[in-house]
Structure formats: structure tokens, C-alpha cells
Image (tube, coloured by chain):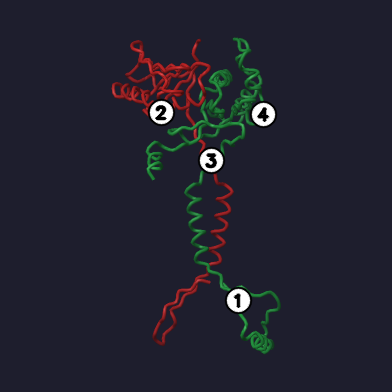
Chain colours: A green, B red
Amino acid sequence: MAIKTPGKHFTSGSAVHAIIKWRKSRRGRKSVMATLMLTPMIDVFAVLTLFLLANFSATGEVLFMQKDIKLPEAQRAEPIERAPVVTISKEKIALEGDIVGKSFTDAIGKLSADNWEIAKLTKMLEDIKYRYYDSKNIPFPGKINIQADKDLPFLLIKRVMFTCTQAGYFNINFATLDSGRPAQKQEETES
Amino acid sequence: MATIDSQSGGRGKPLNVEYNLVPFIDLLSCLIAFLLMTAVWSQITMIKTNEGTSGSSATKDDFTLALYVYSNRQELAIGEGSTLRIPKQGNDYNYNRLAQELLKVKTKYPAKKDILILAQDKVKYNQLIETMDTAIGTDIPNITLSGMLE
């Protein structure tokens, strides 16, 4: 495709002489006309499209990576499903971004049979459950995703799990980072 | 515009064809923009657990396969009988040994699909995930995770 220099473009027949005069005046100079190579550009576009289509995920982003949470890695985990997300970092516990408690000040050191349950989390989870009952006529699946930092002690996770089960969420999923299948990993190291 | 130049050689109609590539490039550009906007770059997956239900209890292998995760060792209990002790290897648990032992159980009881994992409070979440990942790797996908009385 030709790139034209900006300015007047002569279209009428009366301007032909003007074009010839202009061309004659430019004789001997280097042409400013350039041809854009379309074939490599289409090649790049096609490869990029194929790469993006191969990596396309219909479910979209269920969880968002957070700065203060390093997820553990797993080789044989399943694709993540959409469900309410409880995030547990070293500082705080949150449900869908709303802080429901502080991690260590609440969980470690002050535990007794009375304060196992995180009251605010229970209330919020129950609200989500009742909204689900109101909007749909199918049984409540009781699914919840836990996105926790990999260095946390199980005590903290246990406390959140206890609260979730108290609120009627029995199918607890732990978010992990996919580190590839064992065979796939071996191939990568060999190459 | 892209052209296919084919010399006819005779006096007939020239066989040159010119493709109009502009709509094709437009389509590709739109598709790339859409795919880039909706792309998911981090591959987040999940490990499922069932709290309060013990998985496939209806199978003929009706015994409890329990794995106790202590801060210094793991213990695999097969039913009411034997308990196998798997000590730590350095700072981490011996997941290869655990996988071998679970595979032995699977060979003996192929229908066994559920395991109860009981962990101490001090055990790191990362190590628990790796333990559950090992169990899934030996075709025991129904995991019940629970705390241990200390």
C-alpha cells in the first residue's frame, strides 16, 4: 500500500499538467513514496492471534493476585471455579475484599473454644448464602475459595475453615498456582 | 495491496489477482485487541476438599485412610491396623516416600478414593498443599482436611 505525502491531491483532468510539472521538478531526487510490506505484518498478527486464542480462558479471572499473598504451587490441581473468595494474608482476613479480621492478633495466642469462629465472616457468608437462596431455585452448592499465603500456619487456615463450615460452606477449595504436570516439568528441565 | 502475479503469456485476459487485505487486517486487529484485554496471564488452579463428608464411603474398601501431618513427621494409618511413620527429609516432608506408600495402598485397594488428612497447627500451609497434591497424584482425589487434637 502506498503512502502519500500530505498536501494537495490532484484529481481533476485540468491538474494533470501541474502533476507533470511537479514530477519534472523532482527528477533526480530520491522518491518519498514508500511501500508498506503487508505480508510480515499479517504473519505477526496471525501468530499473535493463534497464541492468544490458545491461551484464551472462558472463565476469566476468578482470583486476583495480591501483593501480600504468595500462593503455594501444585502440579495436579483443577481449574478454579467461581465462588466467594476468602483471602488470608499475614496481616488480615478478607471476604471478597472486605476485611473481616486481623490474622495473627485474632488467631494466635488468644484462641479458646469460644473465639474459634470469626463472627463478621460468618455473618457475611450467611448473607451471601441467603442472597443465593433468594435468587436461584437450585440447592446451595456451599463452595468457597480460600486464597492464602503459603507461609501461614495451618492454625489460621483451620480457623477460617471452621467459620466457613459453620456458615454452611462445606466444599472448600484452596487456590494454588499451576506449576505444570510432572511429565511436563521433566520435559522442560530436559530441554 | 497484495497481488498474485501470474503471467498469462498469451493475448487472453491477464490472470493477476489483487486481494483486498485491509478488512482482513482490521479483523485481526480487533481480535488481537479483544484477546489481549480478556487474557488471563496467571494460571490459578485449586485443590478441592470436602469438609464433613468422607468422600466415596460407599465403596467396598470401607476403611479410613488417614494421614497425620506432625511438625516433624507424617504418619499414614490404614484402617484400624498398622501406622506407617514417614520422617522428615531435611526441612521438608518426604513426599516421594509418601507417594510410594499411597501407591501401595492403591494397588491393594484400587477403589479407594478418599483420604482424611489431619494436621498440627504449626504445619505450614504450603506443606499441606504439597501433601494434598501428592495424594491427588496417586489417584486419591477425595480429601477431607481437618485439625488434630494436640
Q: Of callouts 4 and 1, which one flags the residue occurring earlier in the amino acid sequence?
A: 1
Distance Cα–Cα, label 4 vs label 2: 33 Å
Q: What's the distance in space between the residues labelled 1 and 3, CA to CA?
A: 45 Å
Tag 4 residue: A98
Dot 2: element: helix
Can residue A187 be seen here? The reply is yes
Write down the chain letter for disc 2.
Answer: B
Callout 4 touching callout 2 (CB < 8 Å):
no
At 68% across and 84% down in the image, what residue appears?
A12
Q: Where is residue B96, by image quadrant?
A: top left
Where disc 4 sits, the SS reads strand
Q: Do callouts 1 and 2 mark residues in contact (Cβ within 8 Å)?
A: no
**Residue A43 percent across, percent down from the top left:** 49, 61
SS under mark 3: loop
Both labels 4 and 1 in a single chain: yes
Instruction: Decide: few, some or many residues near mark 3? Use Cα within 10 Å; few <14, some 14-19, many ≥20.
Output: few
In the image, which disc is placed on residue B42? 3
Q: Are marks 4 and 2 on the same chain?
A: no
Q: Amino acid at mark 3?
A: Ser
* Residue B56 point in image, percent of width and height: 39, 22
